[in-house]
Amino acid sequence: MRLLALVAVPLLAAGVAALPTRRFPSWRTSLLVATASVHTALVGSLWVAPATPMLNGWLAVDALGLVVLTVTTILFVLTSVYTVGYLARVPRRDGRAFVSGLLAFLAATSLVALSQHLAMLWVGMEATTLAVAPLIFHRHDRRALEAVWKYLLISSVGIALALLGTFFLATAQADVPGRALILSDLVSHARELHASWLRAAFLFLLVGFGTKMGLAPMHTWKPDTYGEAPSLVSGLMAGALTSCAFLGVARVTEVAMAAGLGPFVQPVLIGFGLLSLLVAAAFILGQSDVKRLLAYSSVEHMGLLVLGLGLGGVGAYGTVLHLINNGLSKGWLFLVAGNMVLATGSSSAAANRGLVRTLPVSGALLVLGLFAITGSPPFGLFVSEFTILRAAVGAGHLWIAAVMLLLLAVIFVGMATLLLGVALGEPDAREAPVRESGWLLVGPVTLAAMVLVLGVYLPGPLQTVLAHAAAALGGRAP
Amino acid sequence: MPHAIPHATPLVLLLIVLTDLAVLGTMRLSTCIRALGVQGLLLGLLPVSIAPTLSVHAVGLAVGTVAVKAVVLPWFLVWAIREAAVRREIEPSIGPIASLLLGAGAVALAFAIAARLPLPPGPDALLVPYSLATVIIGFVVLTTRRKALTQVIGYLMLENGIYLFGLTQTERVPFLLELGVLLDVFVGVFIMGIVVFHINREFDSLDSTRLTELAD
Amino acid sequence: MSVAHATALAVLLIVAPALPGIATKTRAVLTGRRGAPVLQLYYDLGKLVRKGSVYSVTTTWVFRTGPVVLLGSLVAAALLLPLDGRDAPAGFSGDLVAFAGLLALGRFALVLAGLDTGSSFEGMGASREVTFSSFAEPALFLCFAALVLATGDASLSGMLGAPVRVAWSHAAASMSLVGLSLFVLLLAENSRVPIDDPATHLELTMIHEVIVLDHSGPDLALILYGSALKLALFGALIVGVFLPRADLAAPAATGVLVLGLALVGVAVGVVESVMARVRLTQVPALITGGAVLALFGIILLLR
């Protein structure tokens, strides 16, 4: 029942929020925060007491799904609090499309995380695309239009290719016992699947969902969309939506690894991973806009995720941990960037110099965030990136480890140049510090604390779940 | 009776590829839309012609497909070109001859790939190469044309190709996927339509190459 | 050459001038006009033969031999076709190359004759004729290639003769695609709508008509008759693909050929009445479309 509620409650709330009203009512944001809290409570209960599968096994929660669901709900509940402050500052008509779009997005991502039926997972992924489109278009101007057009077109093509990949997977399963496209049945009969169809399915699903993740070279929509969307939407996309898309890639990787296609799958994943790192490094150098910089940083981290997946072994464990760290820290940084945009109306580096003086808390969070997102200790990303690096060295791929370290160093230099300039530079006008609204700080501060804790201490239950998820992906705990 | 309409399937599939080529060979938007509509109609015939027996499911799928792909979507696209007052594709990145030759290459590629994949004999083996050909040609249209509307047409052809492939799986994965495809096409175009409308209003043109403010 | 061969060839040579007439008449009727009589071209030819020729002082023997070479090469090409539905009077393996070569020779003679006048109009027409045929010829070879694959025979006698019926039973799709492609080529090679409008006399838009502006009298008669014969040759190719008639008795086979040619003429007329002429720049695209159809036919055969 709880599994169904995780999807149904936000969907219902989205319907209620879409009811027409004359002006912007405060109950709409209250509804948003309340629904998000209920959702978080439900997910929390899954950690305590596992839920039984529902609908003939179509809905179930496994280790990997639980990780994605948890990242999503934490990000969403904190973002919903942020939204209260955001909509108070930027009232846009009645906020109807915005709030109900956010809630629909939550419902769709929950569906993706809980789907054990891969066609239903695809439906959820498609729903996220449609739910996010009006959110990106929130500003209703030329640049937002261009961003939403690129996003819709490229994502739709990606999602279409993923659908074809899903059909290929069903074809691979044609003469095999078990329920069609149910993950557990696919995995348990993996060796009987038609290998050539499975290979085709893997490639199409990787490219299709990879487009939604923003892996290079299908990343081209990402800087435009993250740059133009409201920051909190960019944060949700970079943290939660990409995690869901990664889940799609991970699901088909699970099946392929179980079928013994590792030698085919792993080089492809490693190739996409390194290419993403390379593209991110190339575009981060010389970037002049904070939000676009973060978008390329997201390309980088997507690359790290598939790189870890491709390396296998402890790399899979590092990937799942990195999924959590990346999701939380992307939310943190985009919300800080949002504060910056609210203050100056722009996300360009030039307009925001001296952030530590104008917005002291956000400025400090930005500097800390820089170190977190580039994988410096003591933050969680250091642990997960180090685990992935260890997998590369452990598997004897010393050149992969070397390339990865080199690109991470380049990215660090590029990001530090821009973000330190923004935080510590000389402001144009001598503006007095603005008093920052609490609504807008709860989110980033909490997320920062979580990323910090993950860097020094992994709770026992989390370790168990991570180990289960890594095992499903053909890896192991360190 | 092994098949409801025995020899119709190969003919319908052949005509579907001809509509693909028609879209490639013309620069006139109205011709593209007409070809797409005909393709939708042909796709609607297939569930009936490949079904082992004439089931309610097959007929329902056929009716739904025709309604969406041959009536609603073409009508919607016609509305969009009237609204936006665009007639032809100006300056495509490659001309009709190159497009057609690419199309022929796509068909050859699709048949070559399909010959390598293990396929059970029967209607499925017949559908797969045509499905891949339509997918590839849709992708060619999507990537080589510059008008937002022609790109939408390319996307819809891509979807049609996927639909063709999906027909081989209707028995195993019933309803959900048909629903997914129809919904996807419908909603996808609905949103794209709104965007098209806005692009036209904001930019006074449906040329997606003018959407170049965002770049590195 | 047997009696049946001679009869079939004679019938083709006699009915050829009726073909443009049928097309024009169909077009006229479909557009609600009375139109010229079907046999108009015979009257025109009779009139021209009785007239004398006028030669420009700038022309040489090239100009005078052009029409003769044109007609000669077309008649020679006709000898390669299995007009009676079984085999050709002068068929050999690989004669399809000779067939295309003879058509090219006729075109070459006509183009040279046009250029020989030194007029810029004729030069323009010649350039267009050559440009478009450089697209049409590969397309013709693609059609032939598909037919060779479908029938397993590399001579025109085989491709359009007895094996055709067998080919239809296992490669109906390819055969119909090839037929369609040949029809596009027929329109292109014979300057019909939508490639060119035979009825126009606006030189700037013409392709074929403009080359023969300086010809007159019996020379013009030869050229006009040659054009009709070329149309009939392409018609015979299409009839050969669509109406296999190797099982019929020789007279009946020839009768079917005449009937088939008449149907082709009607089809040309129908196309002309429903389509507008495309712009010159789009002609190559149209011919390429025809070629792609044949290519698709080949792909289906190679499966």
Image: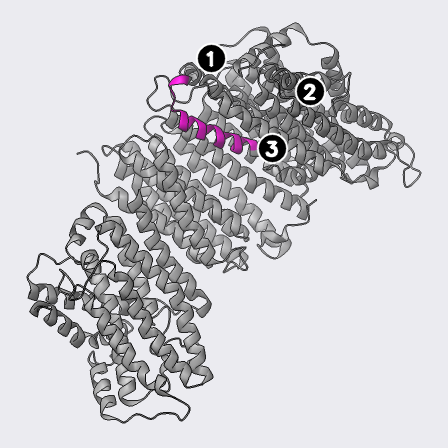
Q: Element at badge 1?
A: loop
Q: Mark 1 = which residue?
A: A53
Question: Given the image, on which type of amino acid does mark 2 rest?
Answer: Glu
Q: Element at badge 2?
A: helix
Question: Given the image, on which type of amino acid does mark 1 rest?
Answer: Pro
Residue A403 vs C300, above or below: the answer is above
Who comes first in sequence, dot 1 or dot 2?
A: 1
Closer to viewer: mark 3 or mark 1: 3
Question: Would you say residue A39 sits in the magenta stretch?
Answer: no
Viewer-closest of A269 and A140: A269
Judge the density around disc 1: few (<14), some (14-19), many (≥20) Cα neighbours within 10 Å.
some
Q: Please state the extent of the stretch shown in magenta in the rendering.
A: A191-210
- Colour theme: one colour
Q: Element at badge 3?
A: loop
Chain of the residue on which disc 2 is drawn: A
Q: Mark 2 = which residue?
A: A385
Chain of the residue on which disc 3 is drawn: A
**From this viewpoint, is residue C23 visible?**
no
Q: Which quadrant would the C terminus of chain C be assigned to in this image?
A: top left
